Image (cartoon, helix red, strand yellow):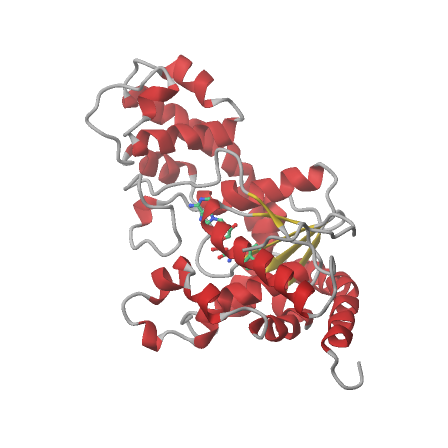
């Protein structure tokens, strides 16, 4: 849909967010959090939010929002997001998100939003009873990104369609308000072996917070025994031992997923892993995978628990992040207000 070249010439910046709903799992870690830290270490200017406004688009347990927001902030910190290098804040504490979302609600077309498959998945059969917020969820997501004029967005593959919508909204705003290059057309950063981690119980479904089976996902708070148990019980297939080449993963989604997790956590290539384990049974590979997973996650889990014990520290990080995020986004909103032509802008 976007056919004009991006003529944005401002600085490059990253934005991404995670919802404070349910326990984070290995998919959130490999698809998002690990990448956030890698990008931060590569020197990117990065803004990360706990997207609590998004969380209320679906029913939530009463009174849970605040503690879940702190939990996700603690997870960001435990995984290595450094508040001295990156900005970390709660979405609801910075007004720009809601303000820009309204403007974008008037820029996005119904037809574009109606195509979003995540709404269809989350609303289920009874879409009439879904909140209007759930429908416009991806419009708020575009506002999150563009309030900071972010040029790059690290996410898992499930967010690809939302990112395309963000680009369409940015492009349409720029044209409608005669402001070429005002907003960048944000690029998704999706590549890598962890971009789509699948359920441990079904290699064709993504690992998800909402799967009723705890055995389908590894939670970031699982201890070593639980991780080993879940990997031991992970579904494989009856097509024999581990293949020794990548071609041999074809038609074996569960095996491909386990090898992908091993690759993403160890930093080894899929080829090298298959060379090492090809021809061996899962009785050998699964304990090795459990060991790699535990070694990688246990320091994170330990830090997470320590940080959670210090809510005053979490709040101070979020407060400082909110001020820094506001300092970037408030001037963008002021410019948007002028471009739209509101009184007093
Ligand atoms: P959320 O909270 O559902 O998920 C957070 C991040 O985890 C990624 N992810 C996965 N990656 C790989 N494999 C999986 N099985 C898996 N499951 C989840 C998601 O892709 C995401 O990167 N809409 C977003 C939150 C959001 C956002 C934004 C993201 C709101 N505003 C602006 C980027 C930019 C979401 O639902 O994330």
Residue 177 seen in this snapshot: yes
Q: Residue furthest bottom?
A: 343
User: In the image, is residue 150 above or below residue 54?
Assistant: above
For the N terminus, the image quarter is: bottom right
| Residue pictured at 71% horizontal, 64% vertical | 322
Residue 311 seen in this snapshot: no
Question: Who is closer to the viewer here, 142 or 28?
Answer: 142
Q: Where on the picture, by quarter, is residue 27?
A: top left
Q: Position of residue 41 (x, y in %)?
A: 70, 37
Q: Where on the picture, by quarter, is residue 286?
A: top left
> Would residue 237 be found to the left or right of residue 77 on screen?
left
Q: Position of residue 254 (x, y in %)?
A: 31, 34
User: In the image, is residue 314 above or below residue 339?
Assistant: above
Q: Position of residue 135 (x, y in %)?
A: 44, 70
| Residue pictured at 60% horizontal, 46% vertical | 78
Q: Residue furthest left?
A: 238
Q: Where on the picture, by quarter, is residue 126?
A: bottom left
User: In the image, is residue 146 above or below residue 204?
Assistant: below
| Residue pictured at 78% horizontal, 73% vertical | 334
> Would residue 217 be found to the left or right of residue 266 on screen?
left
Question: Who is closer to the viewer here, 175 or 255?
Answer: 175
Q: Position of residue 302 (x, y in %)?
A: 55, 43
| Residue pictured at 38% horizontal, 38% vertical | 227
């Amino acid at each position: 849909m976007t056919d004009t070249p991006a003529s944005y010439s401002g600085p490059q910046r990253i934005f991404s967010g995670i919802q404070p709903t349910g326990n984070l799992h290995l998919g959130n870690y490999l698809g998002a959090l690990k990448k956030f830290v890698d990008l931060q270490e590569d020197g990117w200017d990065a803004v990360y939010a706990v997207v609590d406004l998004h969380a209320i688009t679906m029913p939530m347990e009463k009174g849970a929002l605040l503690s879940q927001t702190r939990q996700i902030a603690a997870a960001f910190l435990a995984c290595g997001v450094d508040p001295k290098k990156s900005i970390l804040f709660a979405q609801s504490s910075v007004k720009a998100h809601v303000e820009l979302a309204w403007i974008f609600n008037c820029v996005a077309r119904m037809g574009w939003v109606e195509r979003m498959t995540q709404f269809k998945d989350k609303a289920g059969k009874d879409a009439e009873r879904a909140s209007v917020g759930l429908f416009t969820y991806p419009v708020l997501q575009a506002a999150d990104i563009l309030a900071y004029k972010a040029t790059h967005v690290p996410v898992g593959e499930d967010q690809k369609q939302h990112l395309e919508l963000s680009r369409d909204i940015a492009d349409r705003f720029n044209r409608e308000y005669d402001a070429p290059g005002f907003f960048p057309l944000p690029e998704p950063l999706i590549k890598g072996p962890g971009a789509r981690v699948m359920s441990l119980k079904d290699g064709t479904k993504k690992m998800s917070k909402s799967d009723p089976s705890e055995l389908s996902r590894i939670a970031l708070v699982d201890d070593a025994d639980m991780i080993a148990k879940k990997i031991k019980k992970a579904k494989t297939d009856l097509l024999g031992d581990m293949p020794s080449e990548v071609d041999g993963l074809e038609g074996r989604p569960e095996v491909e997923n386990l090898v992908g997790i091993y690759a993403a956590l160890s930093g080894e290539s899929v080829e090298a892993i298959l060379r090492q384990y090809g021809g061996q049974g899962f009785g050998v590979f699964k304990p090795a995978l459990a060991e790699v997973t535990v070694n990688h996650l246990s320091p994170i889990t330990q830090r997470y628990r320590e940080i959670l014990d210090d809510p005053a520290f979490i709040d101070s990080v979020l407060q400082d992040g909110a001020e820094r995020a506001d300092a970037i986004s408030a001037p963008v909103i002021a410019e948007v207000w002028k471009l739209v032509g509101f009184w007093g802008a």
